[in-house]
Image (spheres, rainbow, N blue to C red):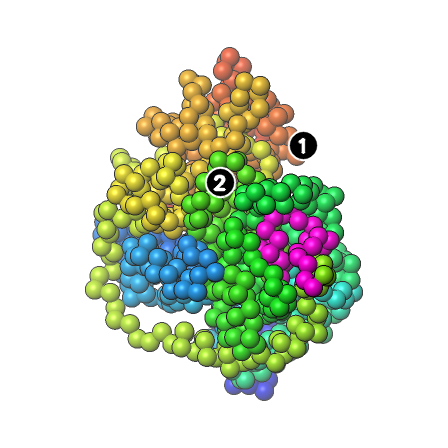
Amino acid sequence: MNTPFRKKLPGTQLDFYDTREAVEAIQPGSYDGLPYTSKILAEQLVRRCEPSALTDSLKQLIYRKRDLDFPWYPARVVCHDILGQTALVDLAGLRDAIAKEGGDPSKINPVVPTQLIVDHSLAVECGGFDPDAFRKNREIEERRNEDRFHFINWTRTAFENVDVIPAGNGIMHQINLEKMSPVVQVRDGVAFPDTCVGTDSHTPHVDALGVISVGVGGLEAETVMLGRASMMRLPDIVGVELVGKRQPGITATDIVLELTAFLRKERVVGAYVEFYGDGARSLTIGDRATISNMTPEYGATAAMFYIDEQTIDYLKLTGRESEQVALVEHYAKHTGLWADGMAKAEYERVLKFDLSKVTRSMAGPSNPHAHMPTTELAKRGIAVNLDQAKAEEQQGLMPDGAVIIAAITSCTNTSNPRNVVAAGLLAKKANELGLVRKQWVKSSFAPGSKVAELYLKEAGLLTELEKLGFGIVAFACTTCNGMSGALDPKIQQEIIDRDLYATAVLSGNRNFDGRIHPYAKQAFLASPPLVVAYAIAGTVRFDIEQDVFGVVNGKEIRLKDLWPSDEEIDAIVNQHVKPEQFRQIYIPMFDLGAVEKAPSPLYDWRPQSTYIRRPPYWDTEGQGALAARPRTLKNMRPLAVLGDNITTDHLSPSNAILMNSAAGEYLHKMGLPEEDFNSYATHRGDHLTAQRATFANPTLLNEMVRDADGKVKKGSLARIEPEGKVTRMWEAIETYMDRAQPLIIIAGADYGQGSSRDWAAKGVRLAGVEAIIAEGFERIHRTNLIGMGTLPLEFKAGETRHTYGIEGSEVFAVVGERTPRGTLTVIMTRKNGERVEFPVTCRLDTAEEVSIYEAGGVLQRFAQDFLEGAEA
């Protein structure tokens, strides 16, 4: 767009958009006071908005107003293979629907550059104690996922603007940080800040570089891919001043686990958090990335750091071109995005966090924000009954609290060389003292980048990790994503027979019950060196700070004897982490070469596949191929009545599929051998399998299902009404689908927190759920619900399901005009005929969301617009 604000960037041959001039034309002197987020959002408005709409949109930022929507145009979309694949399956299905209506399917393409990284598929079937684990795990991954990878390879050639990085290369967030983000983009001769959305809630990982990068659901990503603006209102922007300096021996993991608890308590849910201050400036990009990666765990949308010397040092370290590094520094300083230019930024709310007070930490046993100093393990009831555990071990049994999985995993921590090197140094000291991993511990090491292997080898630390069973099993998400793989059958049987309290310890970001492994009853988050220490201890009943790992030459060995000094860690990092290692890995990885175009724009669906199947969203009988499924918001029966903190792992688990589950029974019927059932996550391209994952989590507590004493039963259970029959959840869903019974879900606070998986919304919508009434919604899940045509409704402040005595036998209707955040009326009819009316807030927050909902969802809306445009 040619506007008066497009100018030459001094000292370069590039243009840029002078956002300062545009902002100060409205309010002189106001630009320097804007938060970092507002400056980035303002730039893209100046660059992309029509002049007639620009002033009103900029006023929202300048005057901190939130009464109008304004557009956001992310520069690119990044996807992992699970949600990225399902998004592209949706687009392939959309092509079929467009073709059926006489449109040109080849015109359905991502408009925005889209990068898909295959990193979520691999399960750790072979642990890190097997020297051939990497090869074996990759072969299993390729065999199990042949259908999926066939489709993904087709997308490379069938769609424009899609780049695919195949399996075995690393995790999308770490690759994004180390390579994909240029920090400052250059397109068509114009320099502008890099921004992106990603189909994973941990996409803010790259916020550490000063790049607005947020996680969205697959459905919202599809909207952005197809060139539509993501409509938003000015978010709450919270300043967090980091002060002090961390104590010796404290890792970035310790900082982020304590910070996560702090920010949860301060209620930054949905906010954009901006970290600044002397403490922030002292943190490396690796440390910052650990903090930004955990954004969804403290409930924020983004976790920004300013561009400064640390950013430049990191870009140089990771092998970026010198011209690009120079551009980032020059552009940031000229446009007020450099840290020094942010000195006058004003925030509506400011929090202060003292790095010097952080102690060694873990999180658990069920939530990432449940901070637990390692000095308080006994006080918290974790490190207890060690004598009992030792006695059981002496009898040849697994101990109480057995650590069955110890995993150095997740880009949260493996993108930080200091964390990885610390684990290697602790392993080295343990090996020197003759300490060993306990035999029942399934240990693994899955760095998010191949670069980690290079610097660990060069430093001589990879062999030390391998000796303790932490050989590299993959360059993928693995255990952090619930892909822990199978246990030794003898160990699994002992857990079952003794009903053993078995646990997992991982350097990941999520530890919800049931997520990590079906037989790990609870899980704890810890730094990579602590993961190694717990593999040696073998039980969480061990007081990791005080108890003795072993006696060597008469000396009792405790954690302090194993823990590396900061000087040791920094010496290894400074000597052995080098730019040429990043170039060695990434230059060939991104040399994708020319690819021959697919012979047809339509995918040749494999009818027997349990991984990839044509989506059903346009197959509603009697309504026309592109019509929304009819929703009346009348006569709705509850499928579930739920409490607080229902996660997307409850709604659509991602871990291994067991034979006795609804999905397992279906896959067995389809002829798949049990050892190749794979995970729920990998089957999300096939709705017939993925539907059976809906509420399949064994830790679900549906308040409609209680025992004789009135206690809520745990499990994937439901109660069919009006009969009052208790069944497995899938049988209830099937029954209601056969009856064409409209459904509703009633829930507590923070509904839908956790991973940004669209099937948490797709599953309930295909079951017939038309509305969900909750005390509050997690941001990404709420947009996914709208994208599927399900209406999110919120109890008024101070009211809950208990206020109205909702127990599940009622019938519901919702009436009123659906307007952004308007009030609607719920009409609830009890079994005895009593009628109760109560108000709720319509959580369609913008006019765009109302439009998408009324169309029946994102895909239906796009199809209607596409066909109308073609006819015009």
Q: Which residue is mark 2?
A: 494
Instruction: Point out the stretch of residues depicted in magenta.
Output: 529-553
Label placed on residue 374: none
Place residue 123 in its image quadrant. Answer: bottom left
Q: CA distance from mark 2 to mark 1?
A: 47 Å
Residue 303 can be seen, yes or no: no
Figure check: 696 above or below 339: above
Q: Is 258 placed left or right of 595 in the picture? A: right
Callout 1, which amino acid? Answer: Gly
Task: Please state which of residues 404 and 217 is positioned toward the viewer in this rendering.
Answer: 404
Place residue 751 in its image quadrant. Answer: top right
Task: Please state which of residues 637 and 605 is positioned toward the viewer in this rendering.
Answer: 605
What residue appears at the point 58 percent right and 19 percent down from the top-left corner?
709
What residue appears at the point 59 percent right and 42 percent down from the top-left corner?
392
Task: Please state which of residues 414 and 541 is positioned toward the viewer in this rendering.
Answer: 541
Task: Please state which of residues 696 and 561 is positioned toward the viewer in this rendering.
Answer: 561
On the image, the x and y values in percent for residue 808 come to: 51, 23
Callout 2, which amino acid? Answer: Glu
Q: Is 786 placed left or right of 85 in the picture? A: right
Label placed on residue 798: 1
Q: Is 452 placed left or right of 389 in the picture? A: left
What residue appears at the point 60 percent right and 36 percent down from the top-left corner?
644
Extreme residue in the left direction:
599
Question: Is residue 538 in the magenta section?
Answer: yes
